[in-house]
Amino acid sequence: MANSRSVEDLLRAEYFRLLPDARRALLETETRVRSALLDTSLALQPFERLVVTARIKECENAINSLRRRQPLGLFDSDQAAEYSLSALRDLAAVRVMAFPKRRVDETHGILQSILAGWTSDPIPAVEESGVPLAYKYFGKWNSDAPITAEVQIVGLLIGLFWEVEHSAIYKPNPSLQGVRTDVVIQSRDDVLTALQRFEAEFANAMMASPRREETILR
């Protein structure tokens, strides 16, 4: 007899089976990242920032994320057994936000060493500048682990903007479906470009005037 449960119901059940593994993956990833960045965190100037956040995708967000990866954004009920949330690369994810740009570059260099076996998947800039908006890696600490984790390294200003933009524009709830217009998308891209340009210009100013470093943005 065919399984009468919907794909979504099967995935909800799987989510809670995977949750303990996702929590372990998140704990290990966050602990390794924070440990690797400890010396940098202790050496920050008063105006510098290094913020580490960690999260596990909520159940419905995880299902929607998997759905968007399917042809036409739909699940095929006849192939229900083929879908698994373990296919998501970011069920467990750690984001590292840093300011100024030199701390982003330093952080990226440090974390590259512990993520050497992971896959690099940078987020490209809006403009073809060659400098990614963020560095992103996904992988497993143990090849037998059921969960793939993600680590993202991004400038603080862009990272904070994404915390607003992600739920309001990138993946809006049903009450905001109409806000994703061409004008809004262009305005979002303009903000990302402006923030990236500011970070670059601020870095140039710091290099040109090292004695002013402790007074800028006090």
Image: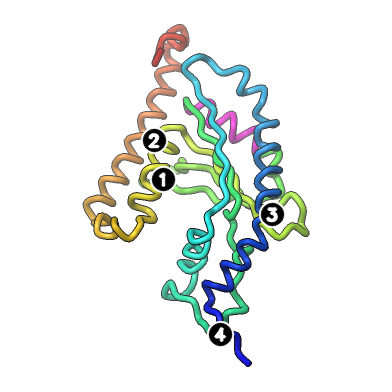
- Crowding at dot 4, Cα within 10 Å, few <14 / some 14-19 / many 20+, comes out as few
Residue type at numbered disc 1: Ala
Kindly identify which residue carries mark 2. Answer: 196
Which residue sits at x=32%, y=46%?
A: 189
Q: Quadrant of residue 216?
A: top left
Q: CA distance from mark 2 to mark 4?
A: 50 Å
On the image, the x and y values in percent for residue 218 come to 41, 12
- On the rendered image, what quadrant is the N terminus found in? bottom right
Q: Give the secondary structure at mark 3.
A: helix
Kindly identify which residue carries mark 3. Answer: 20
Residue type at numbered disc 4: Ser
Q: CA distance from mark 4 to mark 3?
A: 27 Å
Front-lying residue, 204 or 97: 97
Which residue sits at x=49%, y=20%?
A: 48
On residue 125, the disc is 1
Q: CA distance from mark 3 to mark 1?
A: 35 Å
Q: Which residues are magenta?
A: 101-111
- Crowding at dot 2, Cα within 10 Å, few <14 / some 14-19 / many 20+, comes out as many
Kindly identify which residue carries mark 4. Answer: 4
